[in-house]
Image (tube, helix red, strand yellow):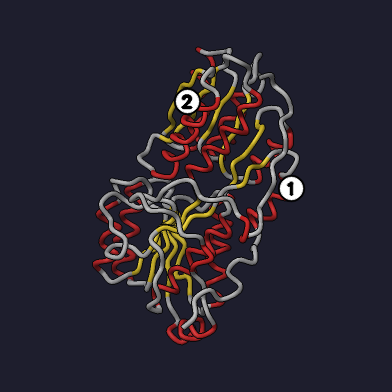
Amino acid sequence: MGKDDGAASAVAPPAASRPLVVGLGPHGERAAPPELIGLSNDILEEARGKRFRIAILLHTTESDWARRQVDGIASVLARAGATTTEIVDCGYDARTQVAAIDRLVRERPDAVIGIPVGSTAVAEAFRKLAVAGIRLVLLDNAPSGLLQGADYVSVISSDNFGLGQIAASLLSPYIPQGGAVCTVAYNIDFFATAQREIAFSKWMRRERPDIALAQVKFDQPKQAGEAIGPYLDANPGLDGLFVVWDEPAVAALPCIRGRKRVPVMTTVDLGGAIAEALRDGDVVKGVAAQRPFEQGEVAATAAIAALTGHPVPPWIALPGLAVTAANAAEALKHVGGAPALLRQPAVQE
């Protein structure tokens, strides 16, 4: 298989014809589609009367993914008359997140929508929210030991296993027979990125057993280049890289470009910088894109539904998008905009 331009993939099928979610949730749950929950006019009227206060707790607020997620959350909260009390940036630091949760427990918002920094270090802190009577909607990851229904409402996620498969399938056409690929992984116990790594490796071993696989890890996204550089020095013949999301992928680009032999790359998340690199085409050949705006809409919908006493599935997941240079512009509309998924009520009283 030689290095060619690859083929463009379809973007954002309608909800009725969406691909199936292939991954399982943090407790082995099968995914519920986002169409299973919604906010009827009666629910919205009830929510407006109660004027719910909701805090957003993120690993970072600096990425395009985070900004789109917040925009999606805000769009639904505004319709429900809810107030966003604050948006917390934890800077990928567990101690910062634990301190923020301790403060939120004292301030008592009605709900928290948050993405845990890791699975174990912040678990006890997140459990305190339920003890304090604060409803918790999780993004992507359930901390170790937390139980749906008792400790949190739901996990709202992308199909991270599916994203890993997409990234592998987009990279494969550019890797020659007998080539070498390195996964650039997050050195934190984080369910979402671990699922991507596992799926990527499984796809490659099944579909491209001729490829030699290796792995390097980074501690912080901005340090990804520091992890990749020495590996490329020691392995100048490397053909390809899979970086588990776009922030570390962008951070690593300077140490990849300019080498005598430049490996190609795929990654996850279609932020602005990685979309530009995808259009340039010298390194980035494909992106497995999440739908962060829509994920934010679903998370906020789950929070309002729970606060008004309506059931929410334990794990709701959205399939990813396979993006190449040929369909990047169209894909950006679906990644960053508001699709008409939650505009019609799906829950009736």
Q: Residue at x 28, y 52 (%)?
A: 123
Name the spot of residue 289 as percent of width and height, x first.
60, 46
Q: Residue at x 43, y 51 (%)?
A: 140
Q: Dot 2 corresponds to which residue?
A: 227
Q: Dot 1 corresponds to which residue?
A: 329
Disc 1/disc 2 C-alpha distance (Å): 31 Å
Q: Is mark 1 on a helix, strand or loop?
A: helix
Sort mark 2 into few (<14), some (14-19) or many (20+) by Cα contacts within 10 Å: some
Q: Which residue is drawn at 69% across and 21% down?
A: 3
Name the spot of residue 119 as percent of width and height, x first.
33, 46
Which one is earlier in the sequence, the residue at label 1 or at label 2?
2
In the image, which is nearer the foreground, mark 1 or mark 2? 1
**Camera-side residue: 25 or 18?**
18
Quadrant in the picture for the N terminus: top right
Sort mark 1 into few (<14), some (14-19) or many (20+) by Cα contacts within 10 Å: few
In terms of image quadrants, where is residue 76?
bottom right
Q: What element carries label 2?
A: helix
Q: Residue at x 57, y 63 (%)?
A: 72
Picture layout, residue 303 above or below residue 88? below
Name the spot of residue 248 as percent of width and height, x first.
53, 36
Image-based side of 113 in relation to 62, left or right:
left
Name the spot of residue 292 as percent of width and height, x first.
56, 55
In terms of image quadrants, where is residue 194?
top left
Q: Label 1 is placed on what type of residue?
A: Ala
Q: Label 2 is placed on what type of residue?
A: Ala
**Camera-side residue: 211 or 105?**
211
Picture layout, residue 154 above or below residue 310? above
Image-based side of 232 in relation to 56, left or right:
right
- Number of numbered tags placed on the structure image: 2
Image-based side of 230 in relation to 253, left or right:
left
**Camera-side residue: 106 or 135?**
135
Picture layout, residue 38 above or below residue 222? below
